[in-house]
Image (cartoon, rainbow, N blue to C red):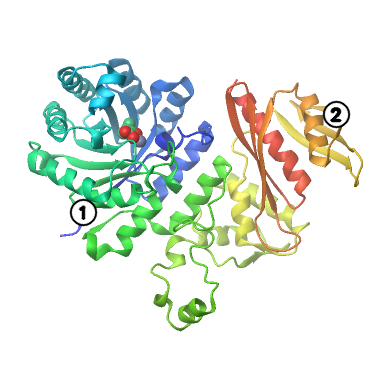
Amino acid sequence: MEKHIRIFDTTLRDGEQAPQCSMNTEEKIEIAKQLELMGVDCIEAGFPISSEGAFAAVEKIAKTIKESQVAALCRAVEKDIDAAWYSIKDAVSPRIHTFLATSPIHMEHKLKMSPDKVLMNIDYAVRYAKKYCSDVEFSAEDAMRSEKEFLVKAFNTAIKAGATVINVPDTVGYVVPEEMNETIRYLFNNVDRIEDVIVSVHCHNDLGMAVANSLAGVKAGALQVECTINGLGERAGNAALEEIVMALRTRRALFGAYTNIDTKQISRTSKLVYNIIGQTAPINKPIVGANAFAHESGIHQHGVLSARETYEIMKAEDLGIMENKLVIGRHSGKHAIADRLMNMGYDFNADELAHYYDKVKELSDKKKNITDSDLEAIINNKERFVGTYKLEHFDIHTAKNSTSACIIKLSKENNIIEGVSLGDGPINAAYNAINNLTGNICEKLINYSIHSVSDGNDALGEVTVKLQSKDVIVTGRGLSTNIIESSIMAYINGINKILETR
Ligand code: KIV
Ligand code: ZN
């Protein structure tokens, strides 16, 4: 019989923990809803003890999500477990995920605990979590560098104390597939009552083997895979959800397994996550990179045209990758936009539709042909919260070999404020003017990037900036056919986000 492989997504926890991948609460909720729509079995929403903001975000996600399980991470100590439980207690299907390291190197140098003490703590933590929640996952951190006999003891202890899922992380991305496969088999042969729990794998990608190791775990009997969208995560990242799901789907007979993921949502989910963290996929990234389904060479093109299977093992449409049709014109009504969005598989409410409609109208004054990509960019760039500052007007003078000057008007709580500044180029002049008006709240522009959303001279330009203020780093985004306007909007969006953290 085919096995159901549960997809445990940790984009909002292990993914978000990575440098430059932090997200605000609204963004996390948006991703959580998309993960739910995609059919993720369990969403790890965060590490609630880490900050008040993290707690609040997990709590909101737990209250919002109805179809997927919601998990919260905690160390194996009471105050962490309390925070985890209170953040997810209103979820339809909550899970407490507690962890403790089991490798000699972690026990000795990080925990400074004897192996016996580690076993006692596992027992205590799982029993303590179990008082709150029937579903408790225990992870043996650095499992793959632990002694196998001790790992068996740790999992025996966790299962006896009531764990329902035991997770085997390759925390430092150290092993190769053969070793992962052997370890999971060893656990199946040696851990008591292992058939009563779900065995899970959680692989990091330091040697580029996270996906292969996860699949080797599945081959050996693991029924849950922990992964992240686009493979986000600490250092080189975690196993990429889209690769795991498509490998299982494309080689279904080999694995004798399936997932509940609606693969048509994969492309959109990947873009949403990249958009939120202000990055784009490397062109050759499996499944979600721009070249993943492109055939340039004549031989390949000829082959694919004669019979697709010659060079394609997956269909782009199964991932929800659009043909980029011309969709909407100046005269299209709300109904036509709603219809197109539904065809593209989007879920939206009346307010969101009204917002998209306004943006399409605005855009159709500047751009002749509006395509699916434009529509998608509008959706991905919708304001995720109402900010303090709003752009009202700008006027920039720039010329070769001379200093640029910018006059800018912003509104702040219904007051219009106006500033002027010079700069080395139009964007520098605009950013200097905004800095003067906002009290230099942005201390450093860490990164600026621009990419065009579709083809043609009138394409939408999407600007992403990373701004730093003390130890806070935020991503700001702006979208317009005028790249100076998108640059200004991205900067203001970032400043609004810095203010939101205060
Ligand atoms: O990589 C790891 O060990 C983890 C655990 C907390 C599951 O992320
Ligand atoms: Zn991890």
| Residue beneath the point at 22% across and 46% down | 179
- Position of 172 with respect to 433 (left or right) is left
Residue 345 or 454: which is nearer the viewer?
454
Toward the bottom, the furthest residue is 306
Q: Quadrant of residue 381?
A: top right
Identify the element where label 1 is drawn: helix
Q: Quadrant of residue 463?
A: top right
Q: From what the image shows, is residue 64 above or below residue 272?
A: above
Residue 144 or 202: which is nearer the viewer?
144
Query: Mark 1 highlights which residue?
Result: 219
Name the amino acid, label 1: Lys
Q: From what the image shows, is residue 309 above or below residue 57?
A: below
- Position of 114 with respect to 343 (left or right) is left
**Crowd band around label 1 with a 10 angstrom C-alpha radius: few (<14), some (14–19), many (20+):** some
**Is residue 353 visible to the viewer in this orientation of the structure?**
no
Identify the element where label 2 is drawn: strand
Q: Quadrant of the C terminus?
A: top right
Q: Quadrant of the N terminus?
A: bottom left
